[in-house]
Image (cartoon, rainbow, N blue to C red):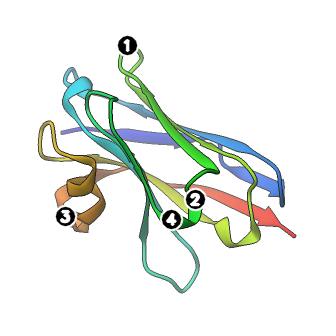
Amino acid sequence: QVQLVESGGGLVQAGGSLRLSCATSGRTFSRYTMGWFRQAPGKEREFVAAISWSGRSTDYTDSVEGRFTVSRDNAKNTVHLQMNSLKPEDTAVYYCAADQQIEASTRHLANSGYTLLYWGQGTQVTVSS
């Protein structure tokens, strides 16, 4: 079992930046592909970004490509999401996720259903116009 705790959300003006962090438990963090999802009010949870267990591969949804950067520090069991040039449509609860399959691809995480991932409790990001 993997426990995930997000932090770093908040209120920011359009064009601003935020950095989300996800602290994880477990001795095998370095073997888990990690990612971020978000859910806006009235909408389904959607994939945002993923980073492979090795850190060599990343994947982004089109709407954040070039603005968001996902990274990981395996020594500290943490994953980050740097969000720049934020837009009001980025407003959502952001969830950290870990693929339950060891050494999964980023695409596997992006396409996995809710029950195939470990989840954090979420952190609110609000972007004002």
Q: Quadrant of the N terminus?
A: top left
> Quadrant of the rendered structure where residue 34 is?
top left
Q: Is residue 57 left or right of residue 26?
A: right
- Tell me the mark number nearer the camera, choosing from 2 and 3: 2
Q: Tell me the residue that label 1 is attached to.
A: 75
Q: Tell me the residue that label 2 is attached to.
A: 64
Please name the amino acid that badge 1 sits on.
Answer: Ala
Q: Secondary structure at mark 1?
A: loop
Q: Secondary structure at mark 3?
A: helix
Residue at 75% of width from left, 65% of height from top?
87
Find residue 115 and name its label.
3
- Tell me the mark number nearer the camera, choosing from 1 and 3: 1
Find residue 62 and name its label.
4
- Tell me the mark number nearer the camera, choosing from 3 and 4: 4
Q: Secondary structure at mark 2?
A: helix
- Distance from disc 1 to disc 4, alpha carbons, whole Å, reads 30 Å
